[in-house]
Amino acid sequence: MSDDTDLTRWTADLMDALGISGTVVDIPLVLDLARDAAHGIARPAAPVTTFLVGYAVGLGRGSAAELAAIASALAATRPAS
């Protein structure tokens, strides 16, 4: 089984367990955002960033793509540590 298949199944299982089945998750977008945060800030920034963007989406602050672009751009402006 490929990693993509495992991740897709995990995502579906987790959404079901959380009671949010039917939600559309753009997995490549989330992974790209996590990568940008991890490389631009620090590895621990990846889960925090993806959580905060998801939370903002849930609050209706914008689409996942819009808010991920804001977060990625912000990460890109940070000086390397």
Image (spheres, rainbow, N blue to C red):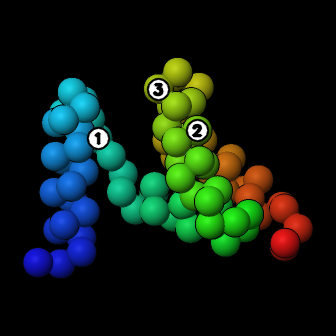
Percent position of residue 75, x then y: 74, 59
User: Quick one: label 3 or label 2, which is nearer the N terminus?
Assistant: 2
Image-based side of 7 in relation to 71, left or right: left
Which image quadrant for residue 42? bottom right
In percent of the image, x 83 and y 61: which residue is there? 77
Camera-side residue: 66 or 22?
Answer: 22
Mark 3 residue element: helix
Nearer the observer: mark 1 or 2; the answer is 2
Amino acid residing under circle 1: Val
**Whether residue 64 can be seen here:** yes
Amino acid type, callout 2: Leu
Q: Residue furthest right?
A: 79
**Circle 1 sits on which residue?**
24
The residue to which callout 3 is attached is: 58
Whole-angstrom CA distance, mark 3 to mark 1, is 12 Å
Q: Position of residue 24 (x, y in %)?
A: 29, 41
Residues at discs 1 and 2 in contact (Cβ within 8 Å): no
Where does the image place residue 12, in percent across and percent down from the top left? 18, 47
Residue drawn at x 57%, y 30% is: 56
Quarter of the image for the C terminus: give it.
bottom right
The x, y position of residue 51, in whole percent, is 52, 42
Name the secondary structure under disc 2.
helix
Q: Earlier in the sequence, mark 3 or mark 1?
A: 1
Find disc 2 in the rendering and name its residue: 52
Label 1 – label 2 distance at C-alpha: 17 Å
- Callouts 3 and 1 close, C-beta under 8 Å: no
Of helix, strand and loop, which one carries label 1?
A: loop
Left or right of 48? Residue 2 is: left
Q: Residue furthest bottom?
A: 2
**Rendered view: 6 above or below 2:** above
Q: Residues within 10 Å of mark 1 (few under 14, many from 20)?
A: few
